[in-house]
Image (cartoon, helix red, strand yellow):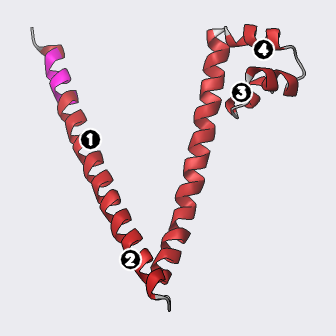
Amino acid sequence: MLVMALAAGLSTKQAAEQAKMGETTARRRLADPEFRRQVDEAKAATIQQVADRLSAASLKAVSTLLALLSARSEAVRLSAARAVIELAVKARETADLEARIAALEAARDGQEGHARWAV
């Protein structure tokens, strides 16, 4: 219970209270590298769940934004058009950066493979 409370972002004191233990005990547990690893893993899992849910919701958000391009209000259409263009540029930049990073990592991995066999 302490792990999940800490992973959720509660302070050590709040997490200890929620886990029904003393703050000193909670701090002692946090000093243990294995316990700290468990908290870090729980945080990472929570962040991944949030990212997955946001990603799923983004499809609906895009549909809403595209529908707003046909709104009656000129101001709404203009805002939607700006948002679509800005988000499209950011998405393209992100995709390009991901591809470039993947290419650099592949090149690095290929060089490391050759370096291991070079004598």
Viewer-side residue, 116 vs 86? 86
Vertical relation: 102 (above or below) 18: below
Number of the front mark, 1 or 4: 4
Residue assigned mark 2: 81
What residue appears at the point 48 percent right and 71 percent down from the top-left corner? Answer: 62
Q: Is residue 71 left or right of residue 116?
A: right
Residue assigned mark 4: 26
Quarter of the image for residue 106 reads top left
Numbered mark located on residue 102 in the image: 1
Q: Earlier in the sequence, mark 2 or mark 1?
A: 2
Residue assigned mark 3: 6
Q: Amino acid at mark 1?
A: Ala
**Residue 89: x %, y % from top left:** 30, 62
Residue bounds of the magenta highlight: 109-115
Number of the front mark, 2 or 1: 2
Q: Earlier in the sequence, mark 2 or mark 4?
A: 4
Q: Earlier in the sequence, mark 2 or mark 3?
A: 3
Q: Residues within 10 Å of mark 2 (few under 14, many from 20)?
A: some
Q: Secondary structure at mark 4?
A: helix
C-alpha separation, residue under disc 4 versus residue under disc 3 = 10 Å
C-alpha separation, residue under disc 2 versus residue under disc 1 = 31 Å
- Magenta: predominant secondary structure element? helix
Q: Is residue 113 left or right of residue 93?
A: left
Q: Secondary structure at mark 3?
A: helix
Marks 2 and 1 close (CB-CB < 8 Å):
no
